[in-house]
Amino acid sequence: MLIDRELVKSAIGMDTLSRQELVFRMKAITDLENPNSVPQVKTWLSENGLEVDSLGKKDVKAALYEAPREIREVLELRLQLAKSSVKKYQVMENAACSDDRARGMFQFYGAARTGRWSGRLIQAQNLKRNSIEDLAVARALVKGGDYEAVQMLYGDVPDTLSQLVRTAFIPRKAIGSSYRTSRRSRHGCSLGSLGKGGAWISSQRMGISTARQLHRYSRSPSKNTVKMPI
């Protein structure tokens, strides 16, 4: 898979700057030597009247509702510092070959007990979904290294970077794996890449025929219907 190295490098630099700012703010509020230390943060929270069993994402979010303002800010900073999906950019940079392509990301029979395939390196099967409406704008700002604009428009820089991880992969062609409403047949059918592959492997003639008709339909948008057996 082709990697956008320019975006990856900019994201890594932006994440480093963001973490420095977050650590500085945490130190200013808590006076802790290492705000990344779980025991130190838990001790500080306990001394300030908030007992937590864990600093995991779910526990921290649950504690936010009842926490006082100062403690709430510390918890929010902790959530931003704990963003693990941002680390995928570093993995991408290390995994990319001289031609900017990452290889060996999936292993056949990777799970010893079930024989299921397994993800390796970037773990491309486990990427955060993006909910940013103006995704192209956010991507352009990050790629251009405009940290202040990203911070001003989106606030949570680590979360913005984690949502842009998917966009660091460059597709060979702009091919959709399924046809949405405008490109569906009159029966509302869609056939993704997995469905096409499964039909081919299992010699399902109807499925293969449907895929071919959908393919021809997608190349001729002027057609309104596709005749398919039900």
Image (cartoon, rainbow, N blue to C red):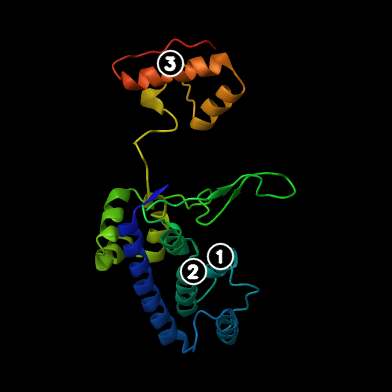
Q: Residue 185: percent from the left, percent from the top? A: 42, 18
Q: What is the CA distance from the residue labelled 2 to the residue labelled 3?
A: 48 Å
Instruction: Tell me which numbered mark, 1 or 2, is placed earlier along the sequence.
Output: 1
Q: Residue 162: percent from the left, percent from the top? A: 42, 59
Q: In this view, does 227 lie to the left or right of 223?
A: right
Viewer-closest of 122 and 69: 122
Q: Is residue 87 visible?
A: yes
Q: What is the CA distance from the residue labelled 1 to the residue labelled 3?
A: 46 Å
Q: In which quarter of the image is the C terminus?
A: top right
Instruction: Tell me which numbered mark, 1 or 3, is placed earlier along the sequence.
Output: 1
Q: Can residue 156 be seen in this view?
A: no
What residue lies at 57% left-to-right and 84% top-to-bottom?
40
Dot 2: within a 10 Å radius of its alpha carbon, few (fewer than 14), some, or many (20 or more) residues?
some
What residue lies at 34% left-to-right and 36% top-to-bottom?
174
**Which mark, residue 197?**
none
Q: Residue 168: percent from the left, percent from the top? A: 37, 52
Which residue, given by chain and number where applicable, does mark 1 sit on?
57
Identify the element where label 1 is drawn: helix
Q: Residue 165: percent from the left, percent from the top? A: 41, 55
Which residue, given by chain and number where applicable, does mark 2 sit on?
79
Q: What is the CA distance from the residue labelled 1 to the residue labelled 2?
A: 7 Å
Circle 1/circle 2 CB separation < 8 Å? yes
